[in-house]
Image (cartoon, rainbow, N blue to C red):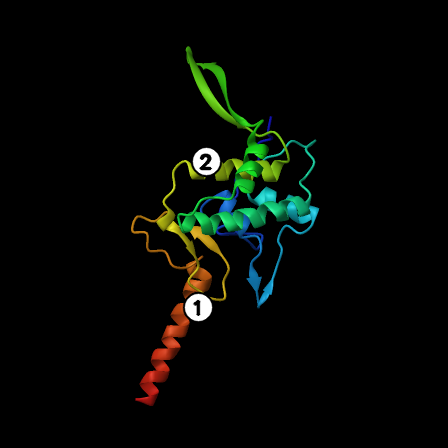
């Protein structure tokens, strides 16, 4: 059974972005551009372990962490899938085979428990396989069951590579996060207005 752990929250956890709205999109976002240089947040096994903790992927202590090379291949496939889904295009057969292979042995298990003289049926997700890849693949599969391609976006900042799923009521989110790209845009617009006013 997966080990329970503390739930982390926030758009940035130990400096890593979790702003995609879904685990699989956060996984795709593990190659941010910082000061013009692409960073790989899961390029080593310790980095994978750190990201998995912050992503709330509970693992058995005996579970072997995923090799970064395998995760990189899955990340490339899911990055392509994001663009396919956003454009309402079919997913590559290779990705479907990859996801099916990862989630084949996993699933929802029913457990009975008693309390207050009543029997309760609980559902628990049981993941079997490489912990990070399996959790990401499961999240992706569940995402496909109910999503709106019009809510899949790239950040409006041309220098930013972050992607997200807009869960807002009005579906008007433009930035990966207001604290970074959104604020930079506001500052740029303010400076442009000041410069225009001075030259008038």
Is residue 20 visible from the viewing direction of this image?
no
Residue drawn at 62 percent across, 36 percent down:
131
* Residue 13 as seen in the image, left or right of residue 42: left
Q: Nearer the viewer, residue 161 or 89?
A: 89
Secondary structure at badge 1 equals helix
Residue drawn at 61 percent across, 59 percent down:
39
Query: Gap in Å between the C-alphas at discs 1 and 2?
Result: 34 Å
> In this view, which residue lies farthest toward the top?
117
Secondary structure at badge 2 equals helix
Give the answer, above or below, for where 26 lies relative to 145: below
The residue identified by callout 2 is 142
> Considering the image in quadrants, where does the C terminus appear?
bottom left
> In terms of sequence position, does the residue under pointer 1 or pointer 2 come before the other?
2
Quarter of the figure with residue 186: bottom left
The 10 Å Cα crowd at callout 1, few under 14, some 14 to 19, many 20 or more, is few
Marks 1/2 in contact by CB < 8 Å: the verdict is no
Is residue 161 visible from the viewing direction of this image?
yes
Residue drawn at 66 percent across, 40 percent down:
66
Q: Position of residue 137 (x, y in %)?
A: 54, 38
The residue identified by callout 1 is 184
């Amino acid at each position: 059974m997966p080990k329970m752990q503390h739930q982390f929250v926030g758009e940035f956890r130990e400096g890593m972005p979790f702003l995609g709205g879904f685990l699989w999109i956060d996984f795709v976002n593990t190659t941010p551009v910082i000061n013009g240089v692409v960073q790989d947040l899961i390029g080593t096994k310790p980095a994978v372990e750190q990201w998995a903790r912050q992503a709330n992927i509970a693992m058995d202590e005996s579970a072997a962490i995923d090799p970064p090379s395998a995760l990189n291949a899955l990340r490339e496939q899911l990055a392509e899938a994001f663009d396919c889904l956003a454009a309402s295009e079919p997913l590559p057969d290779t990705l479907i085979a990859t996801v099916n292979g990862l989630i084949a042995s996993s699933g929802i298990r029913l457990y009975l428990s008693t309390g207050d003289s009543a029997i309760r049926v609980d559902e628990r997700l049981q993941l079997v396989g490489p912990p990070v890849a399996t959790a990401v693949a499961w999240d992706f599969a569940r995402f496909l069951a109910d999503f709106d391609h019009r809510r899949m976006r790239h950040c409006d900042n041309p220098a930013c590579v972050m992607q997200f799923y807009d869960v807002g009521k009005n579906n008007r989110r433009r930035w990966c996060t207001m604290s970074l790209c959104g604020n930079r845009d506001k500052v740029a617009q303010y400076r442009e207005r000041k410069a225009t006013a001075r030259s008038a």
